[in-house]
Image (tube, rainbow, N blue to C red):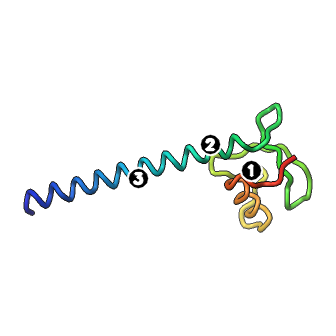
Amino acid sequence: MDERLERFVREKFRSAGRQYARAKQAYDDGRRELDADLPRDEDGNVRLVCRRHAERRAVSVAATGHPACFEAGHPDCEGCAEDVLSGVVETW
């Protein structure tokens, strides 16, 4: 392969890698801000209203945005996790 072509491809890959790193950092920063906006109890658990059981709960939230009471595949739990990620979950 031509040396100029190799250098060009290498530069483009590095540029794409830097762009990916910046986007990932911005996403992580935004998640931390959303997570910080949710009301918490004195133990640091997020106070939310469970859609599935229609009750108030104070639960921990994993880095993935899933509350500790999350059950995969259940429509109410899936919707709740999406709302927690977007920061619009019903709280108390």
User: Residue 28 has which mark?
Assistant: none
Q: Position of residue 39 (x, y in %)?
A: 79, 41
Is disc 3 in contact with disc 2, using a CB cutoff of under 8 Å? no
Q: Which residue is mark 1?
A: 67
Closer to the camera in the image, 58 or 22: 22
Tell me what residue is drawn at x 68 percent, y 55 percent.
86
Disc 2 secondary structure class: helix
The amino acid pointed to by label 3 is Tyr
Which of pointers 3 and 2 lies earlier in the amino acid sequence? 3
Which of pointers 2 and 1 lies earlier in the amino acid sequence? 2
Disc 3 secondary structure class: helix
Apparent side of residue 28 relative to residue 21 in the rendered image (left or right): right
Tell me what residue is drawn at x 18 percent, y 57 percent.
8
Tell me what residue is drawn at x 91 percent, y 58 percent.
54
Q: Nearer the viewer, mark 1 or mark 3?
A: 3
Which of the 4 image quarters holds residue 79? bottom right
Q: Nearer the viewer, mark 2 or mark 1?
A: 2
The amino acid pointed to by label 1 is Pro
User: Residue 32 has which mark?
Assistant: 2
Circle 1 Cα neighbour tier, 10 Å, few/some/many (<14 / 14–19 / ≥20): many
Q: Position of residue 82 (x, y in %)?
A: 70, 60
Apparent side of residue 41 relative to residue 82 in the rendered image (left or right): right
Q: Which residue is mark 3?
A: 20
Q: Quadrant of the N terminus?
A: bottom left
Tell me what residue is drawn at x 83 percent, y 36 percent.
41
